[in-house]
Image (cartoon, helix red, strand yellow):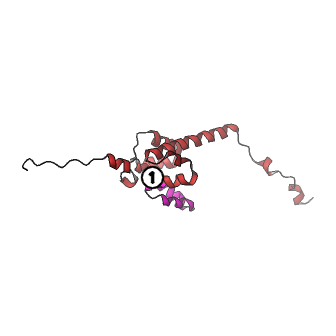
């Protein structure tokens, strides 16, 4: 009996651990909650909410909301760079909604919770890097110049 015959009856599928139905249900619920949170964040930022459910397009829109340049989502495809860019992206997303850098770090490490806070909290979209959003700029009115009574 050589080594080949010893392993010829090995069933790889039987050796794989099975996922419990509870784990599957919890995972589906977490995905749905994440989609709802991203949908709400997109609508707060003036984008259509349905864009949150399209896999690659949602990364493009998230980069557009957080950084102003959606094409930077391609950096997520480069190993090692994607980790650094993810940190920067979530911190910029927090700043785009008027939140602190600490909130951005929370987005990185406890994503679903902080996305829900961003989506359903009192945060308002102010635009990437402090540039007002198109809708916010339309609502803003500059103060009137003082009138000189001598004229």
* Total labels drawn: 1
Residue with the most extreme left position: 150
Q: Give me the residue at 47% from left, 49% from top.
A: 105
Q: Is residue 119 above or below residue 87?
A: above
- Closer-to-camera residue (80/43): 43
Give the image location of residue 126, x and y in percent: 38, 49
Q: Give me the residue at 87% from left, 59% from top.
A: 4
In the rendered structure, the answer to whether residue 105 lies left or right of residue 130 reads right
Magenta part mainly helix, strand or loop? helix
Asked whether the viewer can see residue 133, the reply is no
The quarter of the picture where the N terminus appears is: bottom right
Which span of residues is magenta-colored? 63-89
- Closer-to-camera residue (16/144): 144
Q: Which residue is mark 1?
A: 65
Indicate the secondary structure of the residue bearing disc 1: helix
Give the image location of residue 109, x and y in percent: 52, 48
Q: Is residue 122 magenta?
A: no
Q: Give me the residue at 51% from left, 58% from top.
A: 73
In the rendered structure, the answer to whether residue 51 lies left or right of residue 14 reads left
Asked whether the viewer can see residue 25, the reply is yes
- Closer-to-camera residue (109/58): 58
Give the image location of residue 131, x and y in percent: 36, 54
């Amino acid at each position: 009996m050589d080594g080949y015959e010893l392993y010829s009856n090995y069933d790889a599928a039987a050796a794989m651990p099975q996922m419990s139905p509870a784990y599957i249900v919890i995972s589906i619920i977490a995905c749905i909650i994440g989609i709802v949170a991203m949908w709400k964040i997109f609508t707060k930022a003036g984008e259509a909410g349905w864009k949150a459910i399209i896999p690659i397009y949602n990364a493009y829109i998230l980069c557009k909301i957080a950084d102003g340049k959606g094409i930077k989502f391609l950096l997520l495809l480069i190993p090692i760079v994607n980790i650094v860019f993810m940190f920067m992206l979530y911190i910029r997303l927090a700043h785009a909604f008027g939140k602190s850098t600490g909130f951005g770090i929370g987005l990185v490490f406890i994503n679903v919770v902080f996305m829900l806070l961003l989506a359903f909290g009192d945060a308002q979209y102010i635009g990437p890097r402090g540039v007002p959003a198109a809708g916010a700029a339309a609502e803003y009115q500059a103060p009137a110049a003082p009138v000189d009574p001598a004229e």
